[in-house]
Amino acid sequence: MGAARWFAVVHSYDRSVTRHPAPFVNMAREVREALVRGGPVVALETTYVSHGFPPPAGVETAIASEAAVRAAGAVPATIALIDGEIRVGLQPEDLERVAGADTRKVSPRDLAACLADNAVGATTVAGTLAVARLCGIHHAATGGIGGVHRDAERTFDLSADLTELGRSAVCLVCSGAKSILDVPRTLEVLETLGVPVVGFGTSTLPLFYCRESEYDVSARVDNAAQAARLCRIHWELGRATAVVIANPPPIETALSRTDADALIDAALAEAAAADVSGQAVTPFVLAAIHAASGGRSERVNRDLIVANAALAGAIAAA
């Protein structure tokens, strides 16, 4: 199947969405026009803007990510909920509002409530994938995916990221799974859902702060064209799931496994002592890690988010 025919198949329902916007979606003109003409578009999440970094680092990282997508030849579609609508493609003033203290963390289950309340909401990975699927966007970037939490046998705490990855035809570039998770179980769930986890220039799964691990990925690619071809074949075969492209964090700022594990274990213990649970765990743990590392983890977090946005833009353009 040629590229033009593949695009027609995958986007057969998407073009109607862009011409007749879905309910509550306010899509920036450049995003809408790019989708209508079949151009490359990359969806970007906003949870790290509101919950991942102290201000103004979140807004600065979002702006740098959008610039990286554009430099790669694609259109950025940063997503947030503002004034009772889902905005796909944000203005600088929108990002400033998302960085506010009262911004909600919005997963798919929270979309309707946030809209009904006219609240400001920052989309998680899962929330971003849900909106991307609604709008017909097939490429996205984030820092790291959520998954099965370490005590899931007791709490049943599984990230909604897994569910959305299992039903969204999106190429998601990330730096693997957050290493605060139960990584082997996360990979098992992704295998069950039929989601390929593809290493970019690596045969093992990056662990967010760390470039490598003992966990093998299901496939490997070494450039954007190979990644694009793999995604195209996956969807041509009728698979409606995401493809995870696991991109190691930049070598200049990545942490060693020993340093990262020590920081994570201490932060998880602190969260348990404070009785933090549910959606509050990840931002609490990340903040504790940032504080304990003297800013080293924040630097790698910022760098990998921008690097993943650049790679997603390159794959979309390819």
Image (cartoon, rainbow, N blue to C red):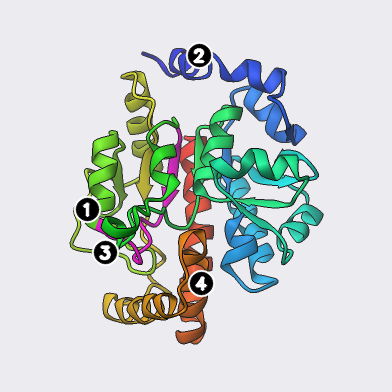
Q: Residues within 10 Å of mark 2 (few under 14, many from 20)?
A: few
Disc 2: which residue = 8
Residue type of the residue flagged with mark 2: Ala
Q: Residue 203: which numbered mark, if any? A: 1
- Looking at marks 1 and 3 on the same chain, the residue that comes earlier in the sequence is marked by 1
* Residue drawn at x 40%, y 42% as measured from the top left: 224
- Looking at marks 3 and 2 on the same chain, the residue that comes earlier in the sequence is marked by 2
- Looking at marks 4 and 1 on the same chain, the residue that comes earlier in the sequence is marked by 1
Q: Quadrant of residue 128?
A: top right
Q: Residues within 10 Å of mark 1 (few under 14, many from 20)?
A: some
- Looking at marks 4 and 2 on the same chain, the residue that comes earlier in the sequence is marked by 2
Left or right: residue 97 compared with residue 217 = right
Residue 177 position, x and y percent, is 35, 57
Between the residue at mark 1 and the residue at mark 2, the CA separation in whole angstroms equals 33 Å
Looking at the picture, does residue 171 appear above or below residue 33? Answer: below
Looking at the picture, does residue 181 appear above or below residue 217? Answer: below
Between the residue at mark 1 and the residue at mark 3, the CA separation in whole angstroms equals 8 Å
> Is residue 61 visible in the rendered structure shown here?
no
Residue 5 position, x and y percent, is 45, 12
Secondary structure at numbered mark 3: loop
User: Which span is picked out in magenta?
Assistant: 170-183
